[in-house]
Image: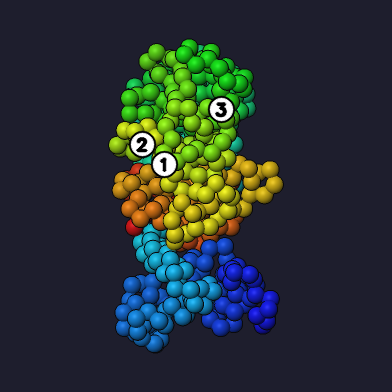
Amino acid sequence: MLSRENKCKGNDYRCEYTRERARNEQQIPAIHVQPLRTVYTSLPKAITDGDAKGRLKGQRKMRGGKWLRDRVGSMVGIHRRPKAWATCFFAILVAAGFARGSSVATVLGTGMPGYSDTEVNNPYGMTIGPDGALYFCDLGNQRVRRFDLKTKRVTTIAGNGKAGYSGDGGPATEASLRAPHELAFDRKGDLYFAERDNHVVRKVEMKTGIISTAAGTGMAGYGGDGGPGPKAQLRQPHCVIRDKDGSLLICDLGNHRIRRLHPETGMIETWAGTGEGAATPEGAPVGGTPLNGPRTIVMAPDGDLFVALREGNAILRIDAKTKTYHRIAGTGEQGYTGDGGSALKATFGGSARGPAARLAGPKGLALGSDGTVYVADTDSHAIRKIDPKTGVITTILGTGMMGDGPETSPLECKLSRPHAVLFTKGKLYVADSEAHRIRLLSLP
């Protein structure tokens, strides 16, 4: 056993001393990236099943929680720190309650890249269409596809499988696309999707199947505000959503701006961002304030917008009434920390290294019916949620390590760079991109 002199500074639960202490004294698995997950799976089943009162199936009585505090606290090195213990114990209870009432399963994909009724290749953005089907960007296949949730049949809506920029004015299935990322329907039921590497937003008229360019020239740049969308320049657009007034908001990520496209007139303008990749001050107005890499947007029923900043490594809320920014998650630093505590102190993008670390911020957002914010923490290989009442963040799917499964336990199922989440009817769809699967997380 290691000596106390070799203990990590600050009693970091990840240090070798703490891990060995946990293994030898508590006979539990080694502590991994997130302590609460290992703690949860290591606790007696009586606790995780809610029978924390009285005897623990042969264990001693709880007696005010002291047994559990000493037992679990020693596992993560916080048994002598009351505040840290309280936070961790709260996170354990949250995770235990969630995990017991949830499960995860693959609805599409085999784990290998492919193109068939059962295969996908690097799925990205998803949306539910007016017909109730699941539409998604199959990035590796250079296509936009439709998955019928009832028949399980998959059809192609746009893309011929060849990377390129061609086909406008003809059938969408004969057009060439390049890196379709996210998609949305307008009020008329026509489909729009952002093509990152073509620097455009394209439109499919669903009645005719004809494709056209709604915004962008195909060349990276910035310009064209106040004029027709097809004559404006974008730089790596990633996301498009429909606002309450029917206009479309586009995350023009490479320009550090959010553009607004008016489908009825075809005109485009800059709505947010200055072009400067700088920090967004708390409470600042939308107009004239910088945004550092707006990657994706989701809208609440009251019109509030939530924006994930990839380079800024944070999540902002835009108040619909005051048109001001308010940070709800992220410190601006890279990492995979904060579970069980305030989302404002959390970090995202834990596993990215080298140049990729600069792009490791949150990449996918969804809103639950109760206001819960779901986050695709892509480079932490995890899906996390932010409680709207407490502001506490927790991991609900993934282990923090890259992999593929096993299903069905959410906190034991490894993910591989998930890029998108979609909440609908009490369930959460997850585009587990590099595992080549679309998974369904049943929420408690």
Query: Could you tell me if the residues under marks 1 and 2 are in contact, i.e. CB atoms within 8 Å?
Result: yes
Please state which amino acid type lies under the numbered disc 2.
Asp
Answer above or below: position of 308 versus 82: above
| Residue 217, picture quadrant | top right
How many numbered marks are there? 3
**307 and 287: which is toward the camera:** 287
Q: Which mark is residue 104?
A: none
Answer above or below: position of 441 versus 363: below
Q: Earlier in the sequence, mark 3 or mark 2?
A: 3
The x and y percentages for residue 443 are 36, 54
Query: Could you tell me if the residues under marks 3 and 1 are in contact, i.e. CB atoms within 8 Å?
Result: no
Q: Earlier in the sequence, mark 1 or mark 2?
A: 2
The x and y percentages for residue 396 are 44, 57
The colour mode here is: rainbow
The image quadrant where one finds the N terminus is bottom right
The residue beneath circle 3 is 275
**127 and 56: which is toward the camera:** 56
Please state which amino acid type lies under the numbered disc 3.
Gly
Say whether residue 114 is left or right of residue 85. right
The residue beneath circle 2 is 319
Q: SS of the residue at dot 1?
A: strand
The x and y percentages for residue 419 are 52, 43
Say whether residue 265 is left or right of residue 333. left
Q: SS of the residue at dot 2?
A: loop
The residue beneath circle 1 is 326
